[in-house]
Amino acid sequence: MVRYKVMLVFGTRPEAIKMFPVYDALKSLPQIETKVCVSAQHRALLDQVLDLAGVVPDFDLDIMAPDQTLDTLTARLILALGAVFDAERPDRVLVHGDTKTAMMAALAAYYRRIPVGHVEAGLRSGDIYNPWPEEVNRRIIACAANLHFAPTAGAAAALEAEHTQGRIIVTGNTVVDALLATQVRLREQPFLAGSIAPVLRRFAGRRIVIVTSHRRENLGQGLSNIAAAIRTLAQRDDVAIIWPVHPNPQVRATLEPALSGLENVALIEPLDYPGFVGLLDAASLVLTDSGGIQEEAPSFGKPVLVMRETTERPEGIEAGTARLIGTVPDRIVAEVARLLDDPQAYAAMAHAHSPFGDGQAAARIAAVLAEEAAARWVVPSLANLQSVSHAPSAP
Ligand code: UDP
């Protein structure tokens, strides 16, 4: 039997985290041959997730270069991905979200008329410069794809409003699948979160606030503001602030001078995924500009303060699991203090229902692709039957 060949393409940590449940779900289907191509747009952080998920890519473009600009990355990606698609001729390409890798994979596939499926489709901020360039990346992918796996009804509605061509399916967000599966693994194998043991010991008895920030829009002034707010919050002796710092040198250059040496602030290396999931479980609240963390934290009942001006995940704000607070230091300090000091305000956010999914998103995506694989299998056999029935009878 010729199997239906699906190629997953991704290049960064968040894409890998959100695609590994899809990979696992597809791998369990005998009628589908699953291939993985990574661009390694972010080498080290991507490799952490591949190791955890036990994924050995079939193609590793190792595209990251020291002189990388959006132009050079775009050019390298389309050439390299096109060559992989020419060699492999997948029946379908699956991309995730809004990275440069996802956009160029969608375009390279489209140029070859290979159908594209878009996981986490339909997120929109409505502002093409915020987040930049992701808002345009995902809109381009929507034009090239014909299967749109929308994480929420709101994302599906955004695609419908744009008269997007193709089929739109609401699946939930695959990050919830990844999070819940990792939580189960941690219960069975707690040592997997060993990377956080020293910092949790150091801050035993304090309420933990996780901070992450590395989005382009916050580099420079935004990050300096956030660091100033953290210095003020660090004056409280009931809290500990743990910040896994992104390797981006610009991020480190701002944070290290501003926050090193504070007794209850730990700037730590990026955590492997189980470590981060363990930390989230132990934390009281999260201050972040990350997209994925906005989606994960509510599944664990952790309030999220989003340090951005806009979010393409309004469902969290509407459900009450997140608040959009920007990056003005006084506002950040006031919002954190409110959650720490007002149990009712905290409970209202912690107990709000997560709108991002039930952990079955990957199964729903795999079911659609299984249907497609089955249709492929049935259509040629029907065609054969028809040609038999129309064949002239033997003399
Ligand atoms: N994450 C991680 N280790 C860390 C910080 C975050 O594994 O030290 C995970 C987090 O759980 C989430 C993802 O990385 O799933 C978020 O990545 P990022 O903030 O880089 O990207 P975004 O979600 O904004 O696209």
Image (cartoon, rainbow, N blue to C red):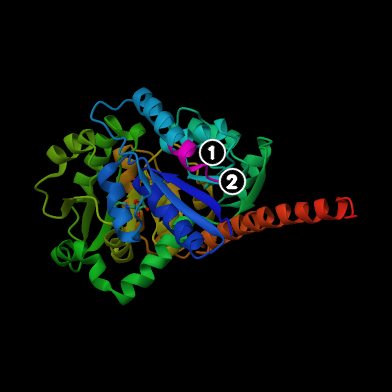
Residue 276 in picture, x, y percent from top left: 29, 58
Residue 267 belongs to the span the image colors magenta: no
Q: Amino acid at mark 2?
A: Ala
Identify residue for label 2: 155
User: Which quadrant, please, contains the N terminus?
Assistant: bottom right
Secondary structure that dominates the magenta span: helix
Residue 14 in picture, x, y percent from top left: 38, 48
User: Which quadrant, please, contains the C terminus?
Assistant: bottom right
* Left or right relative to 356: residue 163: right
Q: Which residues are magenta?
A: 84-90
Residue furthest left as drawn: 261
Residue furthest bottom as drawn: 188
Label drawn at residue 124: 1
User: Who's the residue at 66% across and 37% down the image?
Assistant: 164
Q: Is label 2 in a helix, a strand or a loop?
A: helix
Residue 88 belongs to the span the image colors magenta: yes
User: Which is more toward the observer, 380 or 51?
Assistant: 380
User: Which is more toward the observer, 221 or 379?
Assistant: 379
Q: Is residue 271 above or below residue 219?
A: below
Of the image marks 1 and 2, the number of the one nearer the N terminus: 1
User: Who's the residue at 33% across and 47% down the image?
Assistant: 334
Q: In the rendered image, is residue 341 in sight?
A: no
